[in-house]
Image (cartoon, rainbow, N blue to C red):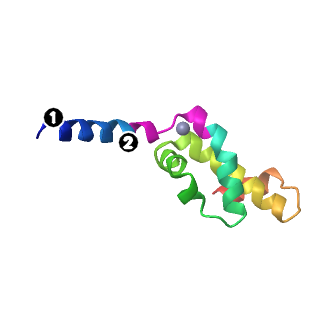
Amino acid sequence: MNRERFDAWLRNIYDTQDVEISCTECFDLVSRFVELETSGRDAAAELPQLKQHLEQCRACLDEYEMLRALARFENEGGTPSLDDLRRSIR
Ligand SMILES: [Zn+2]
């Protein structure tokens, strides 16, 4: 491998790591993600790094599922009870 190709390869690896986000960033983005989803957009395509984080992080996945359940109830115009929320998350 020559020097130029090695540098390109190295940049690739670091670029990939840059794409990964922290839980804090995930927390900031997750409501946007749910918004996109509930408006019928392809949220995973618009925020792929968030989608990736959700697949790896149980805590953020819980957060996401809770927000998504809330958004669904808001769309239906009702106020969810705790039992409703629990059911929709299971
Ligand atoms: Zn996380």
Residue type beneath disc 2 = Thr
**Quadrant the N terminus occupies:** top left
**Nearer-the-camera pick, 77 or 43:** 43
Give the mark count.
2
Residue type beneath disc 1 = Arg
Displayed quadrant of residue 11 = top left
**Going by the image, does 85 lie left or right of 15?**
right
**Going by the image, does 39 lie left or right of 23?**
right
Query: According to the image, label 1 marks what residue?
Result: 3
**Residue 45 at what x, y percent from top left?**
53, 59
| Secondary element at image label 2 | helix
**Residue 10 at what x, y percent from top left?**
26, 36
Query: According to the image, label 2 marks what residue?
Result: 16
**Residue 7 at what x, y percent from top left?**
24, 35
**Nearer-the-camera pick, 15 or 26:** 15
Spatial separation of the CA atoms under disc 2 and disc 1: 20 Å
**Residue 74 at what x, y percent from top left?**
83, 58
> What residue do we see at 77% from left, 53% from top?
70
Task: Tell me if residue 90 is in the magenta stretch.
Answer: no
The secondary structure that most of the magenta stretch takes on is helix
**Going by the image, does 83 lie left or right of 89?**
right
Up the image or down, 35 lies above or below 1; here it is: below
Q: Which residues are magenta?
A: 17-26
**Going by the image, does 4 lie left or right of 53?**
left
Q: Farthest residue to the left: give it.
A: 1
Q: Residues within 10 Å of mark 2 (few under 14, many from 20)?
A: few
